Each structure stands twice: as C-alpha cells, then as structure tokens.
Image (tube, helix red, strand yellow):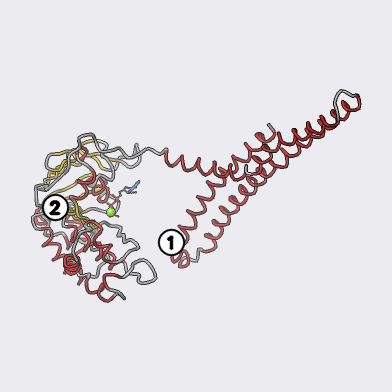
Amino acid sequence: FAAKFIAQRGFAYFHEQSVRRGELTGVVEELVSGKDVLEAFDAQGQACERFRDVDARLGESSFKAVFYSSLVNPTTRFVNALVYAGVGIFGALAAIAGTLTVGGLTAFLSYANQYTKPFNDISEVLTELQNSFACAARLFELLDEPQIEPDRPGAIELRGTTGAVSLSNVCFSYTPGRPLIRDFTLEVRPGTRVAIVGPTGCGKTTMINLLMRFYDVDAGTIAIDGHDIRDVTRKSLRSSFGMVLQETWVKSATVRENLTLGRPDATDEQVKAAARAAFADEFIERLPHGYDTMLNGEEASISSGQRQLLCIARAMLADAPMLILDEATSNIDTRTEVKVQKAFERLMEGRTSFIVAHRLSTIVGADVIVAMRDGRIVETGTHDELLARGGFYASLYESQFS
Ligand SMILES: Nc1ncnc2c1ncn2[C@@H]1O[C@H](COP(=O)(O)OP(=O)(O)OP(=O)(O)O)[C@@H](O)[C@H]1O
Ligand SMILES: [Mg+2]
C-alpha cells in the first residue's frame, strides 16, 4: 500500500515528464530550423528564454518523478524492516515464554526475509517500470488517434483517365464553423489547362489539396471521369496526378533517388531526359557527384530555385495523365522560367492541368482561368474574355502590367 501510494504520484510526474520532453524536442527543432531568422531579427534572447522555460519545466517534472519513484524502495524496505523487527520481538517474547523454540524463531525470521525480498526487488526496478509505462501511455495516445478513413470497400482503380474533372458545389473548411471554399462548381474538359488565380489565402492550394484528396470535401462532389474521387483508391487517384507543389521537398538521398520518387523503375536515360526538360541537368552535372550526389547532407545543399527545378523534373519523369502546378516556377529566375514554361507547354499537351500562379504572365495561355476570391469563384473564362470584361481578373492583371 505504501508503495502504491507513492508510485501513483511518481507516475503522474513521469507522464508529465514525457509530455515536456516532447515539447522540448519540438521547441529545439523549431529554433534550430529557424536559426537564421532568429539571428537576423536578433531574437536569440527570446528563443533562449523560451527554451529555458520549457527546459525548466522538464527539469522540475523529471526531478519530482525521480524523487517520488526513488522513495518507493526505501519505504518498502523500511516497512519490511518494521515487520522483521515485529516478528523478532514477538518471537523473542514467545521464546522466553517457552511457546516457541529458538530454532523455530530463527526459521520464522528467515521466512519473513524471504517473503519480503521480492517486494524489495520489485520496488527497485519501479522507477524504470513507471518511466516505461508513462512513455507507453504517450505512445498509445498517438496510436489511438483516429485513422484516415480507409478506401471504401470496392473502391475502383483509376487507370488511364481521360482527365475530365468535375467539381460540383464543393464546400470545405479546415476548422468547423469557418467555411473556406464555398459552392465551388467547375467542369473541366479532358486535356484542358485550368489556371487558378486569386489573392494570397483565397484557397487555391486548398483546392489542390481537395483534388488530391489530402482532405475530404464537406459537401458537394469532385469527380474524375464520372467517378466520385471518394469511390476511387487514394493510391490510384494520386498517381494520376503529376505535381509540383508550392512547398518543395527533397529527401536526404541522391539526386537520382529524388527524381525517381514517383517512378522507381525509370532508366538513367529517362531520368536525364526529365532533368534536361526541366533545365535541371546543368546544375546537377555541376554537383560533386552528378546524379549520385547526396542532397541535404554535407555533400551538397541546393538553392530553393534548384529544389524547385528538381521537383519539376520529378513531375516530368512521373509522366502522369494529369498535372498540378502550384506556384511551380515561383523561385526560378525569369529566364529559366521562360524555358521551363516551354517544357511545361509540351508536357501539358493533351493532359488536364491545374496551374496556380501569381505571375499572371505564366498563365495567359490557359484554356480556362478561374479567378477566386475568399474561397469562391468570381470569374471564369479565357484571358481575353476576362480582360474584355474588365472585372476582378482584369484588375489583377493590370496591377502587374500597367
Ligand atoms: N492546414 C490548414 N489548417 C487550417 N487552415 C489552413 C490550413 N491551410 C491553409 N489554411 C487557411 O486556409 C486559407 C487558404 O489557404 P491556401 O493555402 O489555400 O491559400 P492560397 O490561395 O494557396 O494562398 P497562397 O497564394 O498564399 O498560396 C488561409 O487563410 C489559411 O489560413
Ligand atoms: Mg497556395
């Protein structure tokens, strides 16, 4: 009972300790990755303050956890010693009175010791046990998080799509009660180029996320070739899109492995052809080991524009029936951009493509331009139609070119 009483308090602190440790790891990760910005704004002081604060709380909970759990063993030993003393005294009295032999008393004392030994042993490892249980509890919290909804039973494989995409009355919000996309309806004929434009934060990337089914729509439907994308396996849906996202990502692996992410069986020739098409071959050849250079490590760090070129080459290699380009050329110098645009034009031929771009010069050739504001479509049409209308798109365009 004594052990249980103390151990319960110890466990609470162990749990707190593992939560704090997670917090501290998060803070460190954030501070290290944002080091340059912190230094530029001379905010190291604030950062250290924040680290010290979390660190101090971790220290406190660790101290208490270890303190309480370390009390358990001495306490059980103390209780056991009392038992031993009690047995000794009563036994001695009984021996004097002649109801117990000295031999019997000795045997009894030795039994008392043997009986309490396991309790002492258990309480010795209690600290480690409790720590493990607290960590396991954290792990189970994570495992108990709801899973993403599995593919529906009987979901079909999307193969060789023509690229007819139809969005009808799509509504979506990240946080319930704060609608973002409202009543979005758009018919995309196979092989057309759809450009989505609009001010920052209007929901362009969100629309891409919905198309790729990174999130499910709250209402309405998105259908590809007449199949609701919820009736299609996620894997086949995603492999139908080649994409260059706004946030570029390269893994710590060789250039080649990065390029073949969506198509592991690509031959060297194909990899090089894709890199050439994306105008990435020039800088790749200049890396210490060419296509076998490890990225993100000591061997080579590449610039944001170069990362974007890699992502473009990756999408070109994937050769999927539909394309998504979210600000795909935003980090690239204008001269390279013009060249990459030409490569895209070739790639987009006959494929349904969704292009998001702030530089409107890159989308004037689109078949349909969708101008969005606050999650709604305000205008659709070709570049010339929208300019002639003199509405929202025209004002966006003029602000860039007047
Ligand atoms: N994961 C998310 N959770 C909650 N809200 C989000 C999330 N991602 C984006 N938002 C919110 O949704 C809105 C639309 O974001 P979105 O990324 O679609 O904008 P965007 O049109 O792509 O902007 P930009 O031109 O800057 O890329 C923003 O106001 C943003 O705050
Ligand atoms: Mg965006």
Q: Position of residue 190 (x, y in %)?
A: 9, 49
Quadrant location, the N terminus: top right
Quadrant assignment for the C terminus: bottom left
Residue depicted at x 52% and y 60%: 47
Q: On the image, numbered disc 1 is attached to which residue?
A: 33
Which amino acid type is shown beneath numbered disc 2? Pro
At x 18%, y 64%, the residue is 267
- Residue at 49% in and 42% down: 138
* Camera-nearest residue between 269 and 171: 269
Q: Quadrant of ligand 2?
A: bottom left
Measured from the top left, where is residue 173 in percent x and y? 30, 41
Q: Nearer the viewer, residue 2 or 319?
A: 2
Q: Can the viewer see residue 112 in this picture?
A: yes
Q: Is residue 217 above or below residue 351?
A: above
Q: Is residue 111 above or below residue 302?
A: above
For badge 1, the amino acid type reads Ser
Q: Nearer the viewer, residue 85 or 38?
A: 85
Q: Position of residue 169 (x, y in %)?
A: 19, 38
Q: Find disc 2 in the rendering and name its residue.
A: 321
The secondary element bearing badge 2 is classed as: loop
Instruction: Where is residue 114? Give x, y as percent.
Output: 72, 36
Relative vertical location of residue 260 with respect to residue 21 in this rendering, above or below: below
Q: CA distance from mark 2 to mark 1?
A: 36 Å
